[in-house]
Image: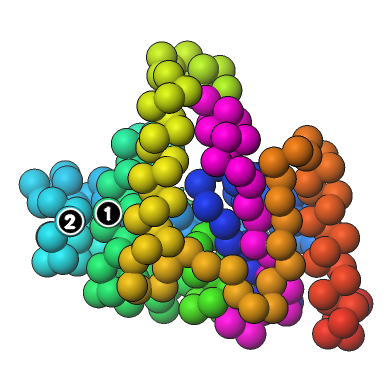
Amino acid sequence: MIIAVDGPTASGKGTIARALAAHYGLPCLDTGLLYRAVGVHTVELGGDPDREEDAFRGAAFPEELLDDPELRTEASGALASRASRHPVVRQALLDRQRNFAAQPGGAILDGRDIGTVICPDADAKLFVTGSTEARAIRRHAEMVERGLDVSLVAITADLRERDARDTGRSAAPLACADDAALLDTSNLTIEEAVREAIALVDAQLERHHIV
Ligand code: C5P
């Protein structure tokens, strides 16, 4: 059973994907982390994530990098967003994601193009979204809690920029698959969003006669 969870930054898709993984007992791949590793490694090599050749070299990142907490920063997210628009980078990460999805028993993948490109035949698809304001407030609160000194205005501007880049690129843009269930988390608590996500996935699995 494959579950695809897509959506923009700070929509709650990562939290929801992990909760679904625990609920259905499936392994979960945060595909954003792979693109973050590409962006960070590109810079480590002295390259520029906007340059296709540089970003492609960055795609051969060492596995240990995936455990580096540096990958979780906003700066790494921005580098990822720049590196991820190159088709050669997306191609370099394709097999790894498809192999993860194909493991016996199935898997959950979260990202931007899981339901549209990586696993178009997924058994259940969610597109998790939220208003820019709600997502910015959430991201700001997370960062303040981590002791970071950032303004809500700056976070909002960063989110808008990342959304525009992820939605506007020609290679596998952030998009809701035609057959995905939409989950708007703007006015939901984490518990409510997770409950709703499970209900939406169960309904799709029932439709596909999987449960
Ligand atoms: O999800 P996360 O914020 O970690 O993703 C970082 C960036 O990686 C996104 O802004 C997006 O540009 C890119 N990404 C992507 N496709 C995915 C996952 C992430 O292009 N499947």
Residue 82's disc is 1
| Residue labelled 1 has its Cβ within 8 Å of some atom of ligand 1 | yes
Q: Residue furthest left?
A: 46
Residue 144 appears at what percent x and percent y? 51, 17
Magenta span of residues: 120-140
Residue at 28% of width from left, 74% of height from top?
87
Please say if 127 is above or below 163: below
Check contact, mark 2 vs mark 1: CB within 8 A.
yes
- Residue 82 highlighted magenta (yes or no): no
Give the image quarter of residue 34: bottom left
Residue 125 appears at what percent x and percent y? 69, 70
Q: Is residue 108 in view from this perspective?
A: no
**Residue at mark 2:** 50
The reply, left or right, for residue 6 in relation to residue 166 is: right
Give the image quarter of residue 119: bottom right
The reply, left or right, for residue 181 in relation to residue 47 is: right
Residue at 58% of width from left, 28% of height from top?
137
Mark 2 or mark 1, earlier in chain: 2
Residue 6 appears at what percent x and percent y? 58, 61
Residue 84 appears at what percent x and percent y? 32, 61
Amino acid, disc 2: Asp
The reply, left or right, for residue 197 in relation to residue 81 is: right
